[in-house]
Amino acid sequence: MARTDDPGADICSDARRLLTPSEAAARVLATLVPIAGVEPVPLGRARGRILRGAIAAPRSLPPFDHSAVDGYALAFRSAADPAAGFRLVGRVAAGRPRSDEVRPGDAVRIFTGAAIPPGCDAVVMQEHADVVDGVVMPRRSYRAGDNIRLEGEDVPAGADLLPGGTVIDPRHLALLAASGLSHVTVGRRLRVAVLSTGTELRAPGETLSEGAIYDPNRVMLLALLDHPAIKTIDAGIVPDDAAGIAAAIGDAAATADLVITSGGVSVGEEDLVRGSVEAAGGFLTPLKIGMKPGKPLAFGRIGEAFILGLPGNPLAALVGAMIIGRQVVAALAGMAAPALQDLPATAGFERRVTPGRIEFAPALITGRDRDGTIIVETLGRGGSARLMPLAAADGFCVIPADAEKVSPGDRVRFLPMDRLCLFGSA
Ligand SMILES: Nc1nc2c(c(=O)[nH]1)N[C@H]1C(S)=C(S)[C@@H](COP(=O)(O)OP(=O)(O)OC[C@H]3O[C@@H](n4cnc5c(N)ncnc54)[C@H](O)[C@@H]3O)O[C@H]1N2
Ligand code: MOO
């Protein structure tokens, strides 16, 4: 946690040097602990929710030894002369077990999923046996244990079914249901409020006055946060007025675990978010990150809530949310942030770049080179305020911070747009 005498000290950046995105994330994450509070939810509503602790298997899976095939269960090991065949004495099907012992050398007709009758220790598939005058004659060699699924071979009772931090997906639901659990205890939903700062901003549908623009950031950020483990709160637009911003952030912080703002985190005197947070009794530490876009970012606390201040330019806000915001949200919600799955790519473009900031440039996939690597072309040079290149892109071309020039054929990385979510798909 941050020190009380200098609350922002742990994440404070050295003003002379840009932080790498990983350094910035590490400083922010060092101040975070997952939110407290769990709740039971029925499995039908558990998709996307996050386990806080490991779940122990209440019973073995499978719960009893059963047949993997349709065929004949044999009392094989006890048989005096297996070569003489096995006398067919009964029948078991899934859900209709037999409790009395099958005698040495006898066989029972069995179907997939049926419990192995006591006394039997191998199953032959019906395609591999003849039945002559009520005697089962296996046509192939077989061994004890063949075609039997053993109790607990999938999950022994008491084993960890799922580790804490799991974001429950359909596979996990199947495992929980098979174990007989109707409910699962998950972390309560993370409450995230999103507000846009800027006197120039209007909500779509409102009339635009001179110098005003519509606000794309809020709807974009709220949609990025749309997830079963998150309760989003639309905290609206706040004009650039210190008292108004302080009040709005204070209100949002009273109901949210995390307040995400956009705009007003840069260096101009109209950039009021930091002062407003301080006036409301919190702190907000500016972070200058060596990434483009998304350089100015701020992180802090007000009351019990954390605050992430994203830049106002939409592309910068999106990249800041994707690179830093994801990790903040994941840490508060009690899960490991899913790794951004970037792909190797070949540049199909030429471009001079100013070294020092890793760049996330909207890009299209335009083909494949000889070894099958995707070729990418960047779109809409240099505009962190531009939305069309972002909307048209297949993803981001990631240009390393130490590059001075990118030429056709150079190796770059590519982050597909469909992986662009705060949490990974749940
Ligand atoms: N002297 C300097 N000026 C700027 C620097 C710098 O280092 N020194 N950094 C630039 C960079 S990089 C960015 S990114 C922006 C970040 O600015 P702020 O976060 O303070 O945002 P604002 O100044 O409020 O707005 C910047 C720009 O974005 C527009 N905006 C704001 N909110 C929204 C919104 N919700 N939807 C769409 N557009 C929004 C706003 O109208 C401005 O055009 O600072 C640079 N300046
Ligand atoms: O970080 Mo700013 O995002 O380059 O426009």
Image: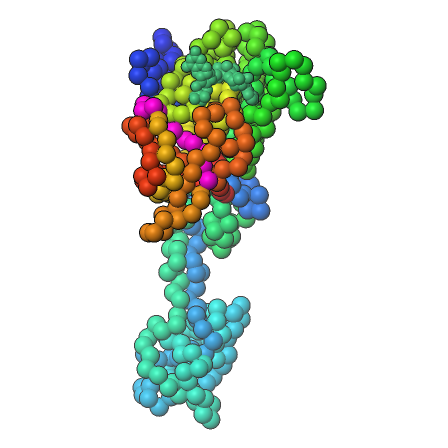
> Who's the residue at 44% across and 71% down the image?
67
Residue 94 lies left or right of residue 65; in this view the side is right
Residue range (magenta): 354-364
**From the viewer's perspective, is 258 left or right of 81?**
right
Q: Quadrant of residue 10?
A: top left
Does the segment drawn in magenta span residue 361?
Answer: yes
Q: Is residue 126 above or below residue 400?
A: below
Above or below residue 90? Residue 150 is above
Task: Name the residue at 39% across, 70% down.
Answer: 148
Pick out the residue farthest to the left. Answer: 402
- Residue 401, by quadrant, is top left
Across and down, in percent, residue 179 comes to 47, 53
Camera-nearest residue between 252 and 401? 401
The one of 341 and 189 positioned closer to us in this rendering: 341
Q: Within the magenta stretch, is there residue 288?
A: no
Residue in front for this viewpoint, 426 or 196 = 196
| Spot occupied by residue 392 in the image (x, y as percentages of width and height) | 53, 37
Please identify the quarter of the rendering in which residue 7 is found: top left
